[in-house]
Amino acid sequence: MYSFIEWNISPEIYTLTVGDLTLPLAWYGLLFTSGFILGQQILFYIFKKEQKPATDVQSLTIYISIATIIGARLGHFLFYEWPLLLSNPTEWLLVLLIPPFRGLASHGATLAIIVAIYLYTKKKPEQPFLWVMDRLIIPVTLGCTFIRIGNLFNSEIYGTPTTLPWGFVFIRETDPSLLPLVPRHPTQIYEALFYLSLFAGTFLLWRYKRHVLPYGFISGLTLILLFGFRFFIEFLKNNQTDFENNQVLNMGQILSIPAIIMGIVILFLINRHKSSIST
């Protein structure tokens, strides 16, 4: 016999009923929104320290908020449910305009955020792309922490069976293919703790080393660490879709590789630029 943690938390905090309309308040939505709000406050602090106007944070927040929602939702369908889009093209509009959210993909959000930063810096040429990315990636890592805690409350995106004493039995699991219920790795907690540590590390790098670090160093290093961890943690996770079962690497790992390469390229270019200046 081995011990385990029984997880049976409802994903909904409260359900408001107005006539025939039911409006559930979910932990995931609360945490997702809280991540944005807290992230914006961190950006206000960073921009104030660097003597940038607060209106720039408000503008950047709009760019990032729209990019995150659109990128994450489209990414989920493109990466995990693309046959549904092929069979029903109108889903392209439904996925963007009609609630409830039917899935969010962090890799789609990452790509969309990069595009949003580019569009923002086109309006703000005095703020270089890599300068903005270095600052923005700090609250983004904190947002990732909140999202994984939200996944925990939803009893989703967890790991493979384990005999470790901190294994979670997710009572609210509804996928028949994963029955009977057994203790599983709480990979949501593993990721949340790592992302929180990454947030602390990137914030301290910015706080004490921003005057000597070249633009792109914080974001390049973060891309490697964040998606490198994401690549390896996937070995402990259940596949999200059936088509991944016959693959050597699942979709999360495949999509993490370009982000890792991007981080390596950024650091390589920074180092080469420093070398060319020193010579």
Image: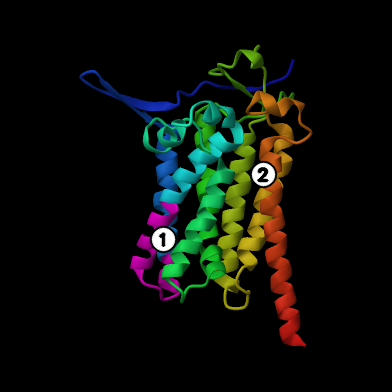
- Image coordinates of residue 19 in percent, x first then y, are 20, 19
What residue appears at the point 67 percent right and 49 percent down from the top-left corner?
227
Magenta-colored stretch includes residue 53: yes
The mark closer to the camera, 1 or 2, is 2
- Residue type beneath disc 2: Leu
- Residue type beneath disc 1: Leu
Quarter assignment of residue 124: bottom left
Q: Is residue 101 above or below residue 138?
A: above
- Image coordinates of residue 41 in percent, x first then y, are 40, 58
Marks 1 and 2, Cα distance to the nearest angstrom?
Answer: 25 Å
Q: Are marks 1 and 2 in contact (CB under 8 Å)?
A: no
The dominant secondary structure in magenta is helix
- Residue 157 placement, left or right of 224: left
Give the magenta part as a residue range: 45-65
Find residue 255 and name its label: 2
Q: Is residue 32 above or below residue 200?
A: above
What residue appears at the point 40 percent right and 73 percent down from the top-left corner?
52
Q: Secondary structure at mark 1?
A: helix
Task: Answer few, some or many: residues within 10 Å of disc 1's Cα (few below 14, many 20 plus, some between 14 and 19).
Answer: some
Query: What quarter of the picture does the N terminus occupy?
Result: top right
**What is the residue that sits farthest to the left in this orientation?**
19
Q: Secondary structure at mark 2?
A: helix
- Image coordinates of residue 110 in percent, x first then y, are 56, 50
Nearer the observer, 162 or 1? 162
Provide the residue designation for mark 1: 60
Q: Is residue 175 above or below residue 224?
A: above
